[in-house]
Each structure stands twice: as structure tokens, then as C-alpha cells.
Image: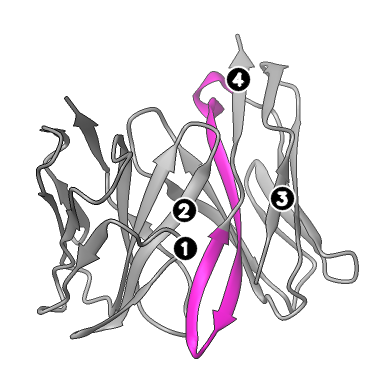
Amino acid sequence: GENVEQHPSTLSVQEGDSAVIKCTYSDSASNYFPWYKQELGKGPQLIIDIRSNVGEKKDQRIAVTLNKTAKHFSLHITETQPEDSAVYFCAASLTQGGSEKLVFGKGMKLTVNP
Amino acid sequence: DGGITQSPKYLFRKEGQNVTLSCEQNLNHDAMYWYRQDPGQGLRLIYYSQIVNDFQKGDIAEGYSVSREKKESFPLTVTSAQKNPTAFYLCASSIGPGYYGYTFGSGTRLTVV
């Protein structure tokens, strides 16, 4: 089955710096890669996603890159702000026995220091 | 506004008791999911349902049960057979197979006392 590894597990940056979160996956059939942001005590929220037919996608200060050959994808946050502090999860799609679901990484806690 | 609602937000259970966590969505989504979140463990799939009256076990289904009698509702029962039920439980929904964007609820924190 699919295995998603995420690193680092924690990251602390100064406000205005960039942050990068990296994920690898094992199933070459995966074709959808979303990123979620989870604030304390809340459910995760989708912030950006990418499908396997593109290599990069941007939305204001966030961008995601995908390298299907190497089976890794990354989230880039530029000009970080204190409100970016949260836990970020990557995920990869898995089709198994006719059912489709997401497999999540273990998450990365980002702290942006003012 | 459309969304997904979990209740209660906090739940306390005595050892040996079954408890049911509620999950309701008005997004007209076909698929619904239950995840368990423990510190440092990420999100682990308990059960999922891609259509009414059908559901499948996830990676950690032992000690849990679900039903999907209505499209809008996917309750999770934590039974006394679940040896370590204290955790944060998240419900999610998606349009269905072929579209993977999940909408999550705000979670239920279950504590065994």
C-alpha cells in the first residue's frame, strides 16, 4: 500500500523567512497530492493541491512542486507570517480494491516567530 | 453555508462503555471518512464509506463500528473493545470517487476516565 513520509517533523522560522516541507510517497499510481493546514483544536483545512499532470502550482504565498520520477512533492511558503503557525499535513491518493482514499503523512509543526 | 459538523466537541467515557460520535454533512458528498489523530501519529483511517449503506474498514478499525443509513450521516461508535480510545477523532467527506478533496469537521476529543 501507499506510504507517505513527511519531513521535517518540526520547523521554526522567523517572520518573513521561507519554509519548505517535503514529502515522499511510495505508490507510483498516486495521482493527487493535497496539503492541509491544521490549527490547534481544529480540523485540517485544504490549502493547496496538485495533480500528477502538472509539476508546480502556486496560490499567493504558497506553492507546491511535484516530481513524479523521484516520487516526492514539496510545499513552499514564502514571506511567512505568525498566522502560518500550524501543523501541515501532506497526503497522496491511493486506489485499493476499487476504493479511493488519501494516505497522510505524520505532519509538520511550523512555528513562525514574530 | 454547507459544511460538516461533528458533535460533541468533547466527550468523556468510562472504561467499558460504548460511545457514539456524530458526523453530519450538508455538502451532498457521497464519501465520508473517520480518522483518529494521536500526537506524532498523523491521521489514521478508521472506516470509510463511499456510498450509502456501504462502508469499508480502514487501517485501524478494530474496536470501532460505523453505519451509513443516510447520505448526510456517518456516526462512529467507539466500543469497549477499543483498548486505547483516548484521542482526537476527525470526520471528513468528499464528493466521491475520482475527486479527492476532503472537507474535515472540527473534531471530537474523546477522553476515557
Residue count near mark 2 (Cα–Cα under 10 Å), binned few <14, some 14–19, many ≥20: many
Q: Earlier in the sequence, mark 4 or mark 3?
A: 3
Q: CA distance from mark 3 to mark 1?
A: 17 Å
Q: Which mark is residue A111?
A: 4
**Chain ID of residue with mark 4:** A
Residue count near mark 4 (Cα–Cα under 10 Å), binned few <14, some 14–19, many ≥20: many
Which residue, given by chain and number where applicable, does mark 1 sit on?
A: B59
Q: CA distance from mark 1 to mark 2?
A: 7 Å
**Circle 3 sits in a helix, a strand or a loop, which is it?**
strand
Query: In the image, residue A83 lies at what x, y percent?
Result: 50, 24
Residue A19 is inside the magenta segment: no
Query: In the image, residue A76 lies at what x, y percent?
Result: 73, 42
Instruction: Kindly indicate whether the residues beneath marks 1 and 2 are on one polypeptide chain.
Output: yes
Question: Quadrant location of residue B60?
Answer: bottom left
User: Which region of the structure is painted magenta?
Assistant: A81-103
Which residue, given by chain and number where applicable, does mark 2 sit on?
A: B44
Res B95 seen here: yes
